[in-house]
Amino acid sequence: MNAEPQVAIIIVTWNGKEDTLECLQSLSSLTYPNRRIILVDNGSEDGSVEAVSAAFPDVKLIHSEVNLRFAGGNNLGLREVLENDDPYCLLLNNDTTVHPEFLTHLITAAEVDPRRGLVAPKILYYDNPKVIWFGGGVIKPAFGYVRHLGLRQPDEGHCDQPGEASFLTGCCLLIKREVIEKVGLLDEGFYLYSEDADYCLRAAKTGYKLYYEPRSRIYHKVSRSTGGAYNLKKWFRRYQSLWRLVRKHTSPITYPLFLLNVLFELLTLPLNALLQTLKLKR
């Protein structure tokens, strides 16, 4: 066991210069020494590449002429990892900041068990760090049900128990190299959303454990790259991706369950939007 295996941190950005610079600045304070950063630029037109090159010359830049979205952008970084000797990679949203010890806790958790292939931290709202955005995750493919535990709830200890999960968010996801070699890359057939859920299911089917480590913490500005709060367009994109997830991982006999779930959520969409707004204003 290597106490400090090298980690390649993959960050994808698209016209997110200021968020990306703040994310990179927070990473410069990490206590974990053995890491490198790969920034994939998805065809930004806001000067992101030039700004990062000037402020963080040690960051490896991969530039795409077009926006490959979440899966395609991260896959460029994952291919770079496979071409090198990094034992771990970390997918990290550019609209996050991190606690200095977050990576140390993730690696410690991963190294305990060779079958722990994916590990994720507790994620708090950047604008309200006393409120949880991700406190573990659950997925039920037949229903197209993918949920963050603790979402929008006060961080009062109820999501502080580490343990196995059925879903981990791709917002911040530590992945062992051998998982990438056996499971493969992210599925670029997902236009937006559910790429991480699909990868979790594929990893679990291959025999790997998914682990939630709440001692590790980061802060998320939440959906800045996709437009922020609840709206019908985001809802449609989400369920479009969930439909692909259901068809990929279940049989047709379960499809009515998914459709009932869609109908229920559509009917309650206005109420959910109102509740989200009220909770985030607290």
Image (spheres, rainbow, N blue to C red):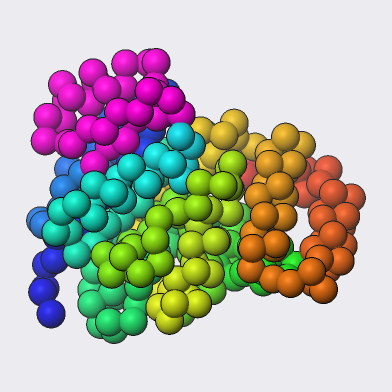
Residue 78 or residue 146, whichever sits in front: 78
Q: Position of residue 179 (x, y in %)?
A: 34, 68
Does the image show residue 275? no
Against 109, is 154 above or below?
above
Q: Position of residue 111 (x, y in %)?
A: 23, 77
Q: In terms of image quadrants, where is residue 64?
A: top left
Q: In terms of image quadrants, where is residue 150?
A: bottom right
Task: Please count the marks in the image.
Answer: 0
Q: Position of residue 77 (x, y in %)?
A: 30, 45
Does the image show residue 269? yes
Point 82% across, 73% down: residue: 253
Residue 16 included in the magenta stretch of the image: no
Q: Is residue 40 left or right of residue 247?
A: left
Point 58% across, 54% down: residue: 194
Point 24% across, 20% down: residue: 51
Residue 126 or residue 67, whichever sits in front: 67
Q: Position of residue 145 (x, y in %)?
A: 69, 64
Quarter of the image with the N terminus in it:
bottom left
Against 94, is 45 above or below?
above
Point 40% across, 29% down: residue: 42
Residue 248 or residue 161, whichever sits in front: 248
Residue 43 included in the magenta stretch of the image: yes
Highlighted magenta segment, given as a residue range = 38-67
Residue 87 or residue 153, whichever sits in front: 87
